[in-house]
Image: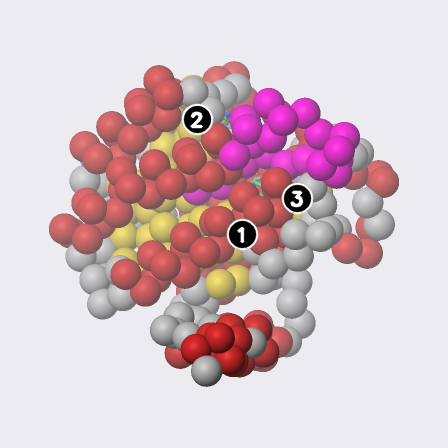
Amino acid sequence: MTENSKGTALITGASSGIGAVYADRLSRRGYDLILVARNRARLMDLAKHLADETGRAVEVIAADLGQKGGLAEVETLLRADAGITMLVNNAGVGATDPLLASDIDKMEEMLTLNVNALTRLTYAAAPGFVTRGAGTVINIASIAGVAPERLNGVYGASKAFVLAFSLSLQSELAGKGIRVQAVLPGATATDFWSIAGTPLEHVPSEIVMSAEDMVDAALAGLEIGEQVTIPSLPDIGDWAAYEAARQKLMPNLSRSVPASRYGVERNKRLLSA
Ligand code: NAP
């Protein structure tokens, strides 16, 4: 670990887009880095550039998180390296085709990366964070997690998982010194769109944010203690109202009798009369 380091941030999907901007911003904030993605050459270029500019230690792991072997390598490191103080679960892929036009094998690959890898990496990192009483998990979800009608439904559902998983972790790890943040970017100018099947030029420019602005806003959200950050949402009160409506449901989500509108109790009474 380098001098005055805030510890090491392990960033998945760091070879491009949002992950590469996190790498830049976190190294300038004093983190050493472990950069994970498949494309070793791109990771090495970024690592050299950031190490030269910031003097931080920057390591690279070329691993396919969609494959058991690659994922296990990163899980093992997260369990073993007590210097890791932050996990940025960013690697992910999207799709823009609707269900009837989508290849189910591609959907499964997406779930494996967006859901399975993120879950396993969190399980690898969190116990050490709890033992040490400190650590940060940043999970990159998407606005599609609350607006699944917007893009491919499997993508939206995978990001709804990331949001639900993060909310659950926040509650379970509260008071243990761990920060868990879910970030819900809207459309962001990265390779994501061409890989997902819709070139960025086809997305209305007024809804597209730069990756730099998105990450700067998300890190500002982390600093002010937001558990859910939606970089483009003008009024955070709108999220608070959404969350309050969810909390209002809580006491009635599990009861011994069905709601009266279903007529089940009435029918039972009629049958037994
Ligand atoms: P991106 O530029 O395509 O970056 C995706 C990153 O994930 C790349 O570094 C890629 O690197 C890595 N990756 C892909 N498959 C992988 C695998 N099997 N194993 C390991 N790494 C893999 O897109 P991005 O926009 O920055 O996406 C980052 C995250 O933001 C994703 O979770 C995405 O769902 C989320 N997001 C994006 C947007 C948007 O509009 N761009 C909006 C909301 C949320 P390699 O190819 O080198 O492996």
Q: How far apart are the two marked residues, 1 and 3, measured between alpha carbons?
A: 10 Å
How many residues crowd mark 3 within 10 Å: few (<14), some (14–19), many (20+)?
many
* Quarter of the image where the N terminus is located: top left
Q: Does the magenta stretch include residue 109?
A: yes
Going by the image, does 75 lie left or right of 61? left
In the drawing, what numbered circle is on residue 65?
2
Q: Which amino acid does label 1 sit on?
A: Ala
Query: Which residue occupies 38% across, 41% down?
Result: 119
In the rendered image, residue 93, in percent from the top left (x then y), is placed at 59, 34
| N-terminal label among 2 and 3 | 2
Is any part of residue 216 visible from this angle? no
Between 161 and 129, the one nearer to me in the picture = 161
Give amino acid for label 3: Gly
Residue 251 visible in this rendered orientation of the protein: yes
Residue 201, above or below 197: below
Q: What element carries label 3?
A: helix
Q: Is residue 185 magenta?
A: no
Q: Distance between the residues labelled 2 and 3?
A: 22 Å
Q: Mark 3 points at which residue?
A: 153
Q: How many angstroms separate mark 2 from mark 1 (CA)?
A: 20 Å
- Residue 232 location (% of width, % of height): 66, 62
Point out the quarter of the image occupied by ligand 1: top right
Where are the magenta residues, as a range? 89-111
Mark 1 or mark 3, earlier in chain: 3
**Residue matched to label 1:** 160
Cβ–Cβ below 8 Å for labels 1 and 3?
no
Which percent across, then down, holds residue 191?
68, 33
Mark 1, ligand 1, within 8 Å: the answer is: no
